[in-house]
Amino acid sequence: MNVYSIVLYLHIVGALLLFVAMGIEFVAVSRLRSAGTAEQARDWLSVLGSIRVIGPVALVAILVPGLYMAATSAGWEGWNILALVAMVGMAALAGSNAARMPAIGRSIGPLRGPLPPEARARLRDRIMWSSILTRIGIGLGVVLLMTAKPDLVGSIVALVVFAAAGAAVAFATSGTAPGSTEPRGLERAS
């Protein structure tokens, strides 16, 4: 075992942790969208707290080894430059969700029992739903870049396609079924 294999291992562990964090967020946001009571909403909001630990650890475990490998062996190519740009974009999208959570928590905090329509609407925020699904798409695109190492044009195409796929799934599943107050699509199935 050499330094490179240890660094690569840490980089892969970071990627796994990132997907763990996104999986937790996906489930929590989807459950928040279907929460009927303040108690259910508070339970799922509390689950999101674990992301505050896992997310930064994942980011450091991805970026530090990734930058080291780019500087010492891979060089700067289209695929790893765009992967770095994608990570910055994913962090910005994650921040959009993180910024919404305190206000949602405060609005749910004093409530008991069934949620009023305003609170339910806030929990079904389409931006939160779009953010997590788009980030999952981008993350899968980055995995493709890391494994296939396409040229710059191929890297751009891959990231655009994967981000668009995530956004399309979010758009297709972000509303409610006609005549229903219950969410439809992926959040209902999770």
Image: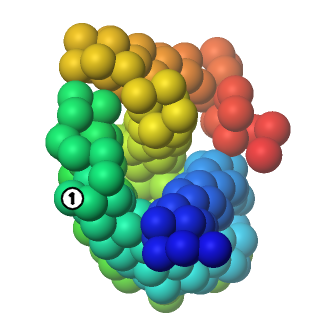
* As drawn, 44 above or below 187: below
Residue sitting at x 68%, y 41%: 187
Give the quarter of the image for residue 52: bottom left
Left or right of 183: which side holds 151?
A: left
* As drawn, 190 above or below 15: above
The answer to whether residue 160 is visible is no
Residue sitting at x 47%, y 66%: 4
The residue pinned by badge 1 equals 71
Q: In this view of the protein, which residue sits in the foreground, 165 or 84? A: 84
Residue sitting at x 29%, y 40%: 80
Left or right of 58: which side holds 101?
A: left
Colour basis: rainbow
Give the quarter of the image for residue 96: bottom left
The answer to whether residue 77 is visible is yes
Q: In this view of the protein, which residue sits in the foreground, 26 or 139? A: 139
Residue 15 at x, y percent in the picture? 53, 58
Residue 37 at x, y percent in the picture? 69, 67
Left or right of 145: which side holds 157?
A: left
* As drawn, 40 above or below 187: below
Q: Quadrant of the N terminus?
A: bottom right
Tag 1's secondary structure? helix
**Number of marks drawn:** 1
Q: Amino acid at mark 1?
A: Ala
Residue 11 at x, y percent in the picture? 49, 64
Most extreme residue toward the front, as rendered? 2
Residue sitting at x 55%, y 66%: 5
Q: In this view of the protein, which residue sits in the foreground, 160 or 169? A: 160
Residue 22 at x, y percent in the picture? 55, 56
Label 1, residues with CA under 10 Å away: few <14, some 14-19, many ≥20: few
